[in-house]
Amino acid sequence: MAVYAIGDIQGCFDELIRLLDLINFDPAVDQVWLAGDLVNRGPKSAEVLRFAMAHPDSIKVVLGNHDLHLLANAVGVNDHHHKMDTMDSVLEADDCEEMLTWLRHQPLFYHDADLGFSMVHAGLPPEWSIKKSLKRAQEVEAVLQGKHWQKFFKHMYGNKPHRWDKSLKGWKRLRFITNCFTRVRYIHNDGRLALEFKGEPKHKPCKQTPWFEMPNRKTADDNIVFGHWSTLGTGQYGNVFSLDSGAVWGEQLTAVRIDKQPYQWFVIDADPAGLPHAKNK
């Protein structure tokens, strides 16, 4: 069995299939981990979801910010709608409800103890271990999978609170947890989340640090794959693996094989002609 982790697809279904062909993916024996943002901005979000749904044993998924954004729009919380959003292939589909139900039952954080790897869409605060991260993720997952899941999206958006405190309660607690798993790139040196700047590290504001370079990070010895950060570039940074190579912007889609060393990387070029927003990066 081979295990591959793939970065943000964002509706680039054709690129996903070409990448799976390149790695000779066999769903009968192999696993593929999708590091969130399956949907939006690209042209074939519904096709990506249907493909993942059709392979429950061989495809593992974590939720990204665009996946949550789709769910928010589906329940009418659309005051954060972006002109580049392309979610109609899901929202107008006959099987829309089935896709949305499947999506909100996916985890925010995934850990395979036997393999010794974890997966998150964005990042982790330095205070959380793998065990704590799983517990924090389960708090949000319980709400998303519950009877009144729609209420979550009325409170999801926003940058505050900036700092983790185990005494946080209610929507503030859930928002902080969600922002870590699906949005964070940098953390202020004093421990506050820095959610505004999205660029590459060489241009970062002073006193901000990539989440995976924070001192005393409790997951410093753990292997983690993540997406979300196309301006960082793909690669291995210590024990973490950055996977978002900007497929939706007409650049590349990337996979890394994580079940054996040396780690093997696989890349296919995206086709800007088939991506409506590639020229607008």
Image (tube, grey):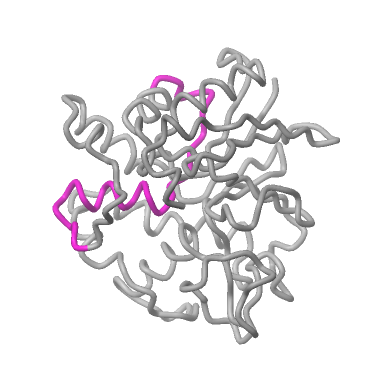
What percent of the width, then of the height, locates residue 18? 56, 21
What percent of the width, then of the height, locates residue 20? 58, 21
Is-magenta flag for residue 56?
Answer: yes
Residue at image point 65% right, 34% down: 255
Q: Give the range drawn in magenta.
A: 54-79
Work out which residue is located at the far right of the displayed protein and give it: 262
- The answer to whether residue 210 is above or below residue 2 is below
Residue at image point 47% right, 44% down: 36
Tell me: 123 left or right of 49. right
Residue at image point 42% right, 51% down: 280
Tell me: 259 left or right of 127. right
Tell me: 17 left or right of 52. right
Tell me: 259 left or right of 64. right
12 or 264, which lies in front? 12
Hey, which quadrant is residue 106 in on the image? top left
Hey, which quadrant is residue 261 in on the image? top right
Q: In which quarter of the image is the N terminus?
A: top right
What percent of the width, then of the height, locates residue 127? 61, 73
What percent of the width, then of the height, locates residue 260? 80, 32
Residue at image point 40% right, 20% down: 54
Hey, which quadrant is residue 94 in on the image? top left
